Amino acid sequence: MSYITRTGNLTETPTLRTGENGPYTYARVAVSDRIRQEDGSYDDGPTVFYDVAVGGSQATNLVEAAERSGNIRITFSGRYRVTEFRGEQGTRIQHEVRADEVSVSLRGQSVTVERTGRSDERETDTY
């Protein structure tokens, strides 16, 4: 498993769930890279979809932000795994991230930040 940091758009508002270790969610994030062409221009590359697992207060805050603002742009970092599935429909590739960090991107959107009561909050994986 490797580590990745990417920025993209939520494809839909994630659903907050509660497990034995607290709140968690799975966010689907679409990422398109800009690819430089030989003539110096840029085109959009293919869209890659990431299934991002988020736990604890980050999960709660992500779901609340998406419910308030809709399709928001986020940055996520975490352990990354690619799984290939082969079936009758052909080959499908799944990009999975267990997020250590999730934040709202400031590109093209504004945010309001409210500090929680605990500034030294350390969480473990809860998903």
Image: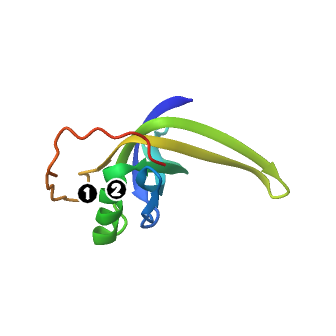
In the rendered image, the residue lying farthest to the right is 88
| Residue at 71% over, 43% down | 84
**Observer able to see residue 93:** yes
Label 1's element? loop
Q: In this view, does 28 lie to the left or right of 62?
A: right
| Residue at 31% over, 52% down | 57
Q: Which of 90 and 77 is in front in this view?
A: 77
Q: Do the residues labelled 1 and 2 touch (CB within 8 Å)?
A: yes
Q: Residue 108 carries which label?
A: 1
| Residue at 52% over, 49% down | 50
| Residue at 16% over, 52% down | 116
The residue at which mark 2 appears reads as 73
Could you tell me residue 99's position as x and y percent? 43, 42
Judge depth for marks 1 and 2 and give the one in front. Answer: 2
Compared with residue 54, is residue 15 higher up or lower down, i.e. above or below? below
Quarter in which the N terminus is drawn: top right
Could you tell me residue 111's position as x and y percent? 19, 58
Which one is earlier in the sequence, the residue at label 1 or at label 2? 2
Question: For mark 1, does the 10 Å Cα neighbourhood hold few (<14), some (14 to 19), or many (20 or more) residues?
Answer: few
Label 2's element? strand
